Each structure stands twice: as C-alpha cells, then as structure tokens.
Image: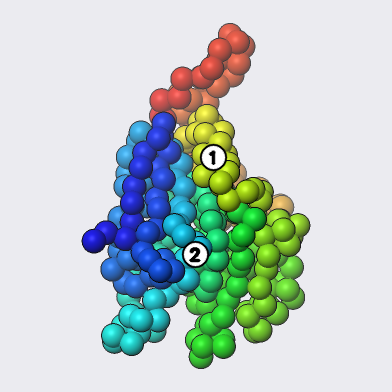
Amino acid sequence: MTAVKLEARDGILIITLDRPKANAIDVATSLELHAAFKALNDDPALRVGIITGTGRFFSAGWDLGAATDGEAVDADHGPGGFAGLTEYFSLTKPVIAAVNGLAVGGGFELALAADLIVASETAKFWLPEAQLGMLPDSGGLLRLPKAIPARLAREMILTGRRLEADEAAALGLISRVVAAEDLLAAALELAATIARSAPLAIAAARDILRQTEGMEVEAGYKLMRSGAIPSYQAMLQSDDALEGPRAFGEGRAPEWKGR
C-alpha cells in the first residue's frame, strides 16, 4: 500500500504523506516521496509542490519500528536523502510544507527542507534525536540555525525543546498560522500566488538564494554577475523576460512560456 498520495490542481502538486499512525518515514517511504518530488520537478505543467500529512502528525520522522526491523541509522534513503527532499538540491521548483500537526525529528527536517512553511494552530516542531542517541543530521543541524536565532536552534538541538506554531511564526520560521480546517486552502492560495510568477524567474530566485546564503552582499553580487548561475542567465535571456514588461504595458496577464 502506498504511503504517498498525489493530487494535481491547476499546476500545483499536493503530496500527502499517509502512513498511520504517525506518518513515520522509512527508506521505502523516502523513495516514494522522492519519486513524487521528482515528478514535480520533471513535469512542465507543475509549478509548485505542497507536502502535507494526515492525522495528528505531519511526520514523526524516522520510523523507529524500521530500526527494530534492522534498518540502520545511517541507511541510504535514496537520491533525495531522508524523506526524498532533504538532499534534493537539484529540485528547480518551490515546495510549501503544510504542517498539519506534529513535526518531529525528521518530520521537522522535511518541513525545513521546503521553501515555505504554513502551519495549523496545532502544529509543534521539535528535534528529539539527541535524547534518542542520534543527531538531526538530515538538515536539522544545518538548516535550523539559519532559520531561527542560532542560540535557540542550539537549545532545541541539545535539549529537544518544542516550538509551538505561534512562537515559530513570531521567529519567522513559518509564513502563517491558520486553523486546521483552513490549512490546505492557505497553502494552495500561497502556491497559486507563486505559480502566477514566471517559472524561470522562480527557479533562478531559488538558485540565487541558495548559492548566496551566508555571503556578504558584495560577494553575492559578484557571483550573480559572474555568469556562474545558469538559471539566472537563462532567465535574463528568456522570452519570458520580454513578455512580463510587455504584458504589464498592455494591461493583461502575462503568458509564460518557460523559455
């Protein structure tokens, strides 16, 4: 039985993790998730992805039951890393995590790997790995200190401290907090807004943000102007870069070609 459900709506791919009771992730589930994210990446009709879960949990992270069955702590979760996304660095399209409940350990790391996070009022985020003799090495150690104040991130990693949804929003970790029944609608609204932008511009923005993260502004400018970011050069030379101003001047919606 598949643990991942897919639904396409107007250029948006909704990826739902449905693995009762806690949407825990083993190697097989990571591979299923990666196949879904790759489908998003490879289909030109799809513009944005949403990853969400069913029930109380967004995801409880690594399936400790799989460990009992012999799955190693350092098992190979496939080309996208744990949960199919945490090491999928060549993904060209944005992903929104719609966190419906508890995002624990690797589930929190899956959310951190998304471009944006929308959360229900019941969402909670924490990294319990150190208390289990492990480390959050699927992005928690690397992404969380860049997303919230570094000392708070360190406290969360060392102690398992939990973040409520409202606190996560106040820290800027998540974009918005909504009622549970409004979560998918809020994520779809955000995704639709992104999808109205030019696809090459979105791809280039993601690449530039990723490759200049941690750089001083001057160094970031030098990298952009060097021609070393292919997606940025493709955007500058695209038909869409001409279409946008033309459509604005003519008072109409642009017709993006992705070239």
Label drawn at residue 141: none
Amino acid at the residue labelled 1 = Ala
Q: Is residue 223 above or below residue 70?
A: above
**Residue sitting at x 58%, y 9%:** 250
Which colouring convention does the figure follow?
A: rainbow
Label 2, residues with CA under 10 Å away: few <14, some 14-19, many ≥20: many
- Residue 58: image x %, image y %? 49, 61
Residue extending farthest bottom: 133
Percent across and percent down for residue 64 are 40, 81
Residue under label 1: 185
Where residue 229 appears, x then y in whole percent? 50, 47
State whether residue 98 appears in this view: yes
In this rendering, position of residue 40 left or right of residue 94:
left
The structure residue drawn at horizontal position 50% and vertical position 77%, both measured from the top left corner, is 137
- Tag 1's secondary structure? helix
Quadrant of the drawing holding the N terminus: bottom left
In front of the other: 123 or 129: 123
Seen from the viewer's position, the closer of residues 89 and 133 is 133
- Return the residue nearer the eye: 21 or 241: 21
C-alpha separation, residue under disc 1 versus residue under disc 2: 18 Å
* Mark 1 closeness class: few <14, some 14–19, many ≥20 residues within 10 Å: few
* Residue 96 position (above or below residue 201): below
Q: Which residue is mark 2?
A: 57
Position of the C terminus, as image quadrant, is top left
Quarter where residue 141 is shown: bottom right
